[in-house]
Amino acid sequence: DGGITQSPKYLFRKEGQNVTLSCEQNLNHDAMYWYRQDPGQGLRLIYYSQIVNDFQKGDIAEGYSVSREKKESFPLTVTSAQKNPTAFYLCASSIGNGLNTEAFFGQGTRLTVV
Amino acid sequence: DQQVKQNSPSLSVQEGRISILNCDYTNSMFDYFLWYKKYPAEGPTFLISISSIKDKNEDGRFTVFLNKSAKHLSLHIVPSQPGDSAVYFCAVREYGNKLVFGAGTILRVKS
C-alpha cells in the first residue's frame, strides 16, 4: 500500500543530544514537509522540499536540519540548539508542481526530551 | 502575523445537526484551500478542498464554501455524527507549494 511512514512513533531524547526522525514515502511525490504540533496550537512548518537535493526553511527552522538525498526520504534532525524540542512531529508529502492536490500525512512522531 | 485564523477553539454540536467551522485568511493571492481532520496522536487526514475559482465544493456530508471578498471559508458538516468529533484544520496553499495551517477547531458532536 502507498503511504507515508514515520518512525519511530515515540522517541525520547536526553537534553543536549541530536536526534533524527525518519520519514519515507512511496507515493512518488516530489514535495515533502515537516510540521510541528504543540498542545493547543496548529501545525507549524519547519522545513519543506519541493524536489530532491533542494529544501527551504519554514517558519520555525531554527534548531532543525533536513536532507533530501532521495525522493522517497526526508529525515529531520532535531539538534541540541532547538530550545524546546518536545512536540508532536508530522511529515507530509504532496505531488507538488503547483497542482491542486492535497498533502498526505504520516502518523507522527512524539518526541520527548527527558 | 497569522495568515490563517480559526477563531473558534472549540465547537459543540448535537448529533444530526449542522456543524459549521470557520476560517479566515489574510492574503487574497491564496488560490487553494483545504480542510483536514485530525484525531489525537494521529496524522491529519484530508477532507475536502476548494480552488479559488469556485465558491462551493461538496462531498457527501461535507461542503466547503469560499467567500473571496471576505477572505473567509467555512466547512459545513450535515448531519453531524459522533465520529466527526476531532480537530479540524483549515489550510491554504502559499507560494512555493507551502501549506499554511490554522490553529484548529475542536469539534465535539454529542449523541
Image (spheres, helix red, strand yellow):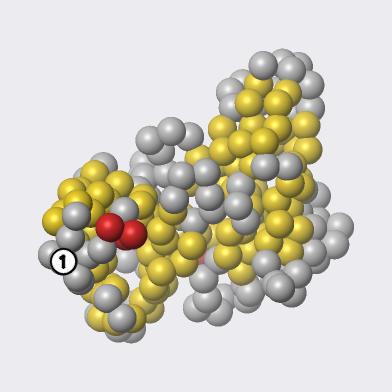
Name the residue rendered at 56%, 76% in the picture. Answer: A98
The residue at which mark 1 appears reads as B16
Determine whether B91 is above or below B47 in the image: above
Image mark count: 1
Residue at the image position 56 percent from the left and 38 percent from the top: A88
Between residue B10 and residue A62, name the one nearer to us.
Answer: B10
Residue A61 x, y percent position in the rendering = 63, 39
- Quarter of the figure with residue A86: top right
Does residue B70 appear in this view?
no
- Residue toward you, B79 or A17: B79
The amino acid sitting under disc 1 is: Gly
- Picture quadrant where residue B81 is located: bottom left
Q: Pointer 1: residues within 10 angstroms few (<14), some, or many (20+)?
A: some
Q: Quadrant of the N terminus of chain A?
A: bottom right
Where residue B84 appears, x then y in whole percent?
Answer: 32, 60
- Residue at (41%, 69%) from the top-left corner? B47
Residue sitting nearer the eye, A49 or A39: A39
Chain under callout 1: B
Position of B14 with respect to A110 (left or right) is left
